[in-house]
Each structure stands twice: as structure tokens, then as C-alpha cells.
Image: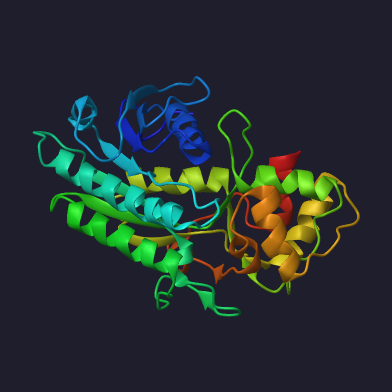
Amino acid sequence: MRGPLEKQKVVIAGGSGFVGLSLARHLADRGASVVLFSRTLPRVDGPWKHHRWDGRTLGDWVEQLNGANGLINLAGRSVDCIKTPDHQDEILRSRVESTRILGAALRTLSSPPSIWVQMSTAHIYGDPPTLLCDEDTALGYGLAPDVGRAWEQAFHESLLPTQRAVILRTSFVLGRDAGAGSGALNKLVPLVRFGLGGTVGSGSQGMSWIHYEDMNRLFERGLTNPDMQGVYIASAPNPVSQAEFMRELRRAVGMPIGLPAASWMVRIGAKLLLRTDPDLALYGRYVHSRRLEEESFQFCQPTIREALHDVLS
């Protein structure tokens, strides 16, 4: 499908993970010429060019931005890890430093991109137990909200005055791609198939999510819609509780039972078995985008049942 991105050059910084490669394919299908920046080569081949960068220093990659139409920044260490002091430091630094070095690179160019679409995190709102957050909700406190604040501040400081800026505060992206590595969902599905996909903790914690195709469409919209500017929540309009999410995940994989896990069990098992932070499962948030609703954005996958069925079928 060709469209407004025909013959446009788009650079994706931090594009070697599941979200980046899915987006790269999507944009290429719409006619864009896609360039990826990452520390390592993508695990799969695709319709893109790749340039190595370390996300901290200027290098040969800078020239790829000259004459590009749009820049998308996804760079940042995965939060799917045990939160040691070293990991927490890298989660913050990888986001802030990569954003700042992109800003420094833009200032060396004669023809920088006119559009910068920046990933952020819906975790910036913290973990309010029942509040439905939108773009105007007060930000939270703790590691993830602090990282989100610093990330967005670095973005605002790095923007050129002439650039149109879009920030997408992203929730849990639903998708599976073994070649690129898709993170949390690939970890959850085997647990569910072994009968371990029950309620975690209270089960009332919010699960805000978005199907990968809708995530791609939001990035495309950020690049092509001149009226889109500022902060948006990138999340489906129907967040669910953790208990409902796991119930629908069990349905999608055909497993009728799921053993519940008390909080203390999760705190032990997440670190020993999954090598990740138990708080990712025990806490959550309910978010939806007031701005996308006002702008009549239509989600292809608005409900968790159809989204999981599509991803896992």
C-alpha cells in the first residue's frame, strides 16, 4: 500500500527491536525509504538500511539524517529486566543520552528532518490503582515516571525550533515476532500454556495495551498528519484489569485454567524464572487518549479479545 510516505526518507533510531522492525516494515510498505540506527545488527533482514551507532557519540550515522523527511526515536534499554542499580542507571541514560545526541546531530545538518516523533512511556503516570489517566493527568513518582520526565525533557531540549514534534506515551505493545524478539508477550504465552496464566496479585491492576498495527499507524500518523503535535497516549481505548487480560490470553491460546499467583510468589518467580522486575506484573495503570478520541482516530484493534486473537492466531 502506497501513500503519503511515497519516496520519503524516515530514520528510526533504536530500531532493531520488535517495535522498530515492525514499524520499519510498515513504513516501507507505504513507500518510505527506511534507515535504522542501532548498536547491533537486526536479527532479521528487511526493507531497510542499517547503520551502527552507540546512542552517545556522533559518527558516520549523522549524515543519514541530512535530507531525511522524518525522525523517529525509540532508543532505550528494555525495562524488562531485574532493576539492579546498574540497570536502572542504563534505563535512564540510554534514553536521555540517545535523545541528546540526536539533537546534537541535527544541529550539524544543512537539511534536518522537519518532523520528530518521539517514543515515551505511559508509565510516566505511575501506578494509580483505579484512576483512568489521559494526557492531562498529573504525572506519577518513582523510577519509571522519573525516567519518563527526563526522557521527554531531553527531547524538548533537543528539538530544533523548526521541527514539528510528536510524543507518543506508549503502553504494552501486543505483537509476536520471534526473529526480532518481542519481549513480554513471548514470555507470557508459554506460562499460560503450562497453566500458570492466572490472576497475579490482586488482579485489579491496570493493563493498558495497544496492538502493534495500531502502534505503527500512530507513528505513521505522526509523520504525515500536520495537525498532530505534542503529547499523545499511545494505547487502545479499552484498558483492562490484569485478571481480565490473563483471562483473554488464556482464551486466545486455548488454555481453560490458570493458576493464580500471590504477590510473594511473583516477587520470587519473576526474578528467578523470568529474570525480570516483579513490579511489572504487580502494578499497572489504566490509560486512554483523550486527544486521539477528540481527533477521531479509529483503532483497528480496540478490544483485548480481538487483539490477542489476531496476534496469536
Q: Residue at x 53, y 59 (%)?
A: 235
Q: How is the image coloured?
A: rainbow
State the residue lying farthest toward the right. Answer: 256
Say whether residue 142 is visible: yes
Residue in the foreground of this view, choosing between 136 and 271: 271
Say above or below: 200 vs 155: below
Please provide percent x and percent y for residue 171.
52, 58
Residue in the foreground of this view, choosing between 53 and 229: 53
Say above or below: 244 vs 22: below
Please provide percent x and percent y for residue 253.
82, 45
Please provide percent x and percent y for residue 295.
42, 62
Question: Quadrant location of the C terminus?
Answer: top right
Residue in the foreground of this view, choosing between 227 and 152: 152
Left/right placement of residue 66 relative to residue 279 reads left
Quadrant in which residue 149 is drawn: bottom left
Residue in the foreground of this view, choosing between 186 and 238: 186
Left/right placement of residue 80 relative to residue 117 reads right
Q: Residue at x 91, y 54 (%)?
A: 256
Q: How many marks?
A: 0
Please provide percent x and percent y for residue 17.
49, 36
Left/right placement of residue 52 relative to residue 84 reads left
Q: Residue at x 65, y 71 (%)?
A: 205
Say above or below: 28 vs 276: above
Say whether residue 291 is visible: no
